[in-house]
Image: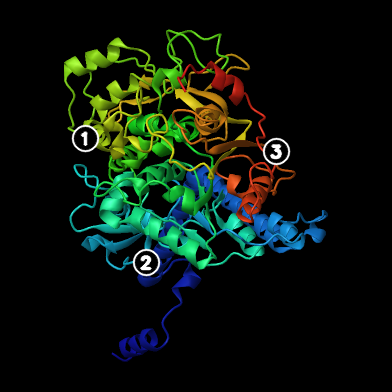
Amino acid sequence: MVSISKLKKFYLVEPLKSSSLGFHSFEETKKCESIVINEVEGKRQKKHRKKQCKDWRCIDYCFWMIGYMCTTWWLLSLLYGCLPAMLLGFEAPVSPGVRLSREGVTALHPVVLVPGIVTGGLELWEGRSCAEGLFRKRLWGDSFAQILKRPLCWLEHLSLHDETGLDPPGIRVRAVPGLVAADNFASGYLLWADLIENLARIGYEGKNLFMAAYDWRLSFQNTEIRDQALSRLKSHIELMFVTNGYKKVVVVPQSMGAIYFLHFLKWVETPPPMGGGSGPGWCDKYIKAIMNVSPAFLGDPRAVSNIFSTESSVGFVRTVASGILNFDYIGRQTLEHAMRVCRTWDSIISLMPKGGETIWGGLDWCLEDWNNYDQQEISWGSNSATFNLSYEAVWIDCDEMSRESIQKISKKRAYTARTVFDILNFVAPKMMKRAEAHFSHGIAENLEDPKYAHYRYWSNPLETKLPDAPDMEIYCLYGVGIPTERSHVHKFYPSEKDKSIPFQIDSSADGEEGSWLHNGVYFVDGDESVPIVSSGFMCAKGWHGRTRFNPSGTATYTIEYQLKQPGGLIDRRGLENGASSNIMGNAALIEDVLLVAAGATGVDIGGDRIFSDIMRMSERINLRL
């Protein structure tokens, strides 16, 4: 017993160190196994993470590279705009406003600015529950942050009613008022800020400078019906005339704003209830000059492709980044949503080509020197389209198209400025039905016909007369030398992911070296947005002298601005740029506007300045004047 108790005491008090015998206790063995398992698991996870890094490394590098490039470009632009020009190694260009102010040029005539399509800001006044917190916030013309936060809600609030072309129930989106409506739009897209700043240099301010903001989505007459925009514009012109020493107003419309103001010229003198009721002579009394910047008087061929396939100017995106456009980001195909929204905007119809084949050419001739193309594949019309159609369902406003309709469309492989309305009546019947009530695109045979007193003809310079204003001046100011979309080649594009837009620009269609055809688009001379025939014909010929479209002989001037390439990588100020998106920053254009606003006439600033073939092209147009 003694020995046993001693042995027990020995084990209890001084347990053996089992490690000294070469093996471990159960607890230590379990702990060691756990450590080994953890080490193995750690190595496996580390290996898995390395594999993941390898799988995503290319994408990560791409995004990091894009981020670095954007950041670097932003920093360079910031430095370029902030640092004194002397530190950049060249003499700072003196803005036209500063130079003219030094020469003694001062403000004289009040100035009214009229923005074009998509360039004016839109803000929310009433909306759905999804737009909570956006009261009087910009939905359009700012950072476009809402399209990322709530894309479907954003699109819903920018859409108009597909029957009336006015507000949908429960939604009110209105134009942002004042100069801030369109002074800046988005990065890289210069609008009115440069012109406003230069006008301020010679003495302009709020009392003699006004931005005639309007909801550019609406048809022109509907801006008056819903917002009384035309009445308010008339009142502002009359008020500025009185408060500025009875000086006539200089009006500067841009792009679609030119035909919007052309509509206003007829509206203001037409008796009520259709018009403003001011009677003949109002324009001659209150308006000194209308300086149209990049005017789309005879339309923009891109409008057809926008309605048909929601492409046109984004055609190059189809070529470079078709995968992005097909990405199902906002519930369905991105372009489908854009199409549904755009087809509620009646203003797009105002930009459809006007004058038919007389202006834009037919299947056997065109204004431009196109002599080497296969007529089986293209037409000379303003927006030709080539289709390879099969009898698949084609989405239209009613979500269905009959087999007979497909056959009727596919019989013609080329559509001109006259026949393209036939196909649009099939693919967008609701939009085209509204359009017939508000716009016309033909040529008047007899302007004395009473039917031309209706407002649907007022925005077409070929179906309306200028007002009786012999002392007024009209200018057409636009850039030249830039490839501009003239017509498009489309193809049938069946897709399970994108059934709503079965046609797209055929980006594989390319001409030979030196051809006008590139990536499915035919290009001509213009200002990047509008071909020169649309911007320049009316001033060069249609209104020049005393014609049936200009019975009082209002003086017209055609002034073109040649494109000059930027002098350096970060030269983005556009002082010599003729592109439509940047022409508002063109120094020569700004100087011309300032001089006329200060009292100069068209003769004083040098009269016509023409560098393109607009005069030769105008002579080829067989139009009775």
Q: Characterize the local packing of mark 1: few (<14), some (14-19) or many (20 or more) Cα atoms within 10 angstroms.
A: some
Q: Quadrant of residue 35?
A: bottom left
Residue 396: percent from left, percent from top: 23, 30
Residue 418 image offset from top left, x and y in percent: 35, 20
Compare residues 565 and 223 and report the one nearer the observer.
Answer: 223
Q: CA distance from mark 3 to mark 1?
A: 43 Å
Q: Secondary structure at mark 2?
A: helix
Quadrant hosting residue 565: top right
Q: Tell me which amino acid carries mark 2.
A: Lys
Q: Residue at x 36, y 89 (%)?
A: 9
Q: Secondary structure at mark 3?
A: loop
- Where residue 444 sits, quadrant-wise, is top left
Front residue of 106 and 421: 106
In primary-sequence order, the first of circles 3 and 1 is 1
Q: Which residue is mark 2?
A: 30
Q: CA distance from mark 3 to mark 2?
A: 80 Å
Please determine whether, in this image, residue 32 is positioned above or below residue 372. below
Whether residue 93 appears in this view of the structure is: yes
Residue where numbered disc 1 is placed:
430
Note whether residue 500 is visible: no
**Residue topped by disc 3:** 564
Q: Amino acid at mark 3?
A: Lys
Looking at marks 3 and 2 on the same chain, the residue that comes earlier in the sequence is marked by: 2
Front tag of 3 and 2: 3
Q: Is residue 10 left or right of residue 157?
A: right
